[in-house]
Amino acid sequence: MIKRREYMKKLAEWKDRPIIKVITGVRRSGKSTLLRMFRDELTETGVHEESLISINFEDIRFEGLQEYHKLYNYIIEKLSGQRKTYIFLDEIQMVPDFQQAVNSLFLRDDVDIYLTGSNAKMLSGELATLLSGRYVEIKLLPFSFREYYESVGGDKRQAFLSYTQHGGFPYSVTLKGDIWRDYLSGIYSTVLLKDIAAKKRITDIPLLETVIRFLADNVGNIVSVKKIADTLSSDGRKTTTVTIDSYVDALKEAFLIYEARRYDIKGKQHLRSLEKYYLVDLGLRSLLIGERSRDIGHILENIVYLELLRRGYSASIGKVDRLEVDFVAERGDKRIYFQVAASVMDKTTYEREFTPLKKIKDNYPKYVLTLDEYPMGEDGILQKNIIDWLLEIP
């Protein structure tokens, strides 16, 4: 089992602090496993089993606790009052008004609370109001390439090719042959029907699937809700921008897609339209659109975007004059610029990737990530092999 070190480190850093730890991410990205690893680590350091309360709301044994008064009373009865108790509530969004129970538990000094959820909206609305400033969100993604390679081993370039096709959902990495498609199909259907259609009361499932397939086929392309609606309408699938906008929001809430906004580097402001979207896992992209679209440049962009999120950065699409910088990555007062391409051995491609970075006059680091074996770089712009960059320990 791959020990997800960066996430475990974050949990350890926040352990016993008076703050609620909330782990979010798409279904089957490893949230429950991460909690189990952390619980095991607690017991190894001397925490008694009696001081651990674990409830997974996908387990039918706990169906009776999906009412916040009952949940609160169940936990209160198990507290000793003499020692710290660690409370793990998995897929907490299945409990209506769960924030009421969590808020009351948080008032106690003898508990340390850990939650997981598969919907971004669980951290909005009343929960955000009740617990403002009292929770930290740990955003869990499927395996990074470094985690994937740690699992599969072998030739790193061959492993990387497999990663671009199969993705990094933890359990799928263990599957041989084409059975991974069946597994990912199950994840996709569950998220689409249970986490999106049912919660949002969406009845036009074919249209919802058409939207996500469109986005999967256009990762790395600048798109707009209007463009999606117009494209579908021209293909004979009549719809409106309002409907498409609501579907895209639902896909984001379920962590199936991520939105990267555009940022005017010279104007130092985010722009209000023409975003890019990236898929949470490239295995799902292979499932949705097959091998008909193997635009390696955009696939690499998707991988780099998710890796930046894993490393704690926010990532925007940069605009400098009329040129584009693939990513402006920011974390606190730190900023890094990235260009991503399969290769810059061709002179025209080299100029296209390096010119936008040369136009940026600040002193923040600038990188061009490619699959080239012998990276060069110039004018303070560093070129790196993307596989080596992904295998670095951040």
Image (cartoon, helix red, strand yellow):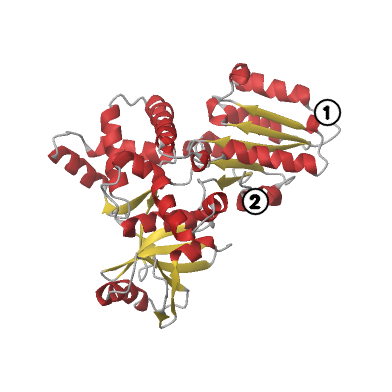
Residue 329 sits above or below residue 250 on the image: below
* Element class at badge 1: loop
Q: Earlier in the sequence, mark 2 or mark 1?
A: 2
Q: Which mark is residue 341?
A: none
Instruction: Say which quarter of the image contains residue 211.
Output: top left
Instruction: Say which quarter of the image contains residue 283.
Output: top left
Residue 264 sits above or below residue 249 on the image: below
Q: Amino acid at mark 1?
A: Ser
Left or right of residue 192: residue 210: left
Q: CA distance from mark 2 to mark 1?
A: 27 Å
Q: Residue at x 55, y 52 (%)?
A: 147
Looking at the picture, how far across and down is residue 84, in whole percent? 80, 37
Looking at the picture, how far across and down is residue 10, in whole percent? 65, 51
Instruction: Say which quarter of the image contains residue 236.
Output: top left
- Residue corresponding to mark 2: 10
Q: Amino acid at mark 2?
A: Lys
Left or right of residue 393: residue 265: left
Looking at the picture, how far across and down is residue 79, in whole percent? 79, 27
* Element class at badge 2: helix
Q: Residue at x 83, y 30 (%)?
A: 81
Of residues 28 and 324, the one drawn nearer to the viewer in this rendering: 28
Q: Residue at x 53, y 42 (%)?
A: 170
Q: Residue at x 26, y 36 (%)?
A: 210
Q: Quadrant of the C terminus?
A: bottom right
Of residues 27 and 1, the one drawn nearer to the viewer in this rendering: 1
Of residues 341 and 7, the one drawn nearer to the viewer in this rendering: 341
Left or right of residue 52: residue 167: left
Of residues 245 and 348, the one drawn nearer to the viewer in this rendering: 348
The number of callouts visible is 2
Q: Quadrant of the N terminus?
A: top right
How packed is label 1: few (under 14 Cα within 10 Å), some, or many (20 or more)? Answer: few
Q: Which mark is residue 80?
A: 1
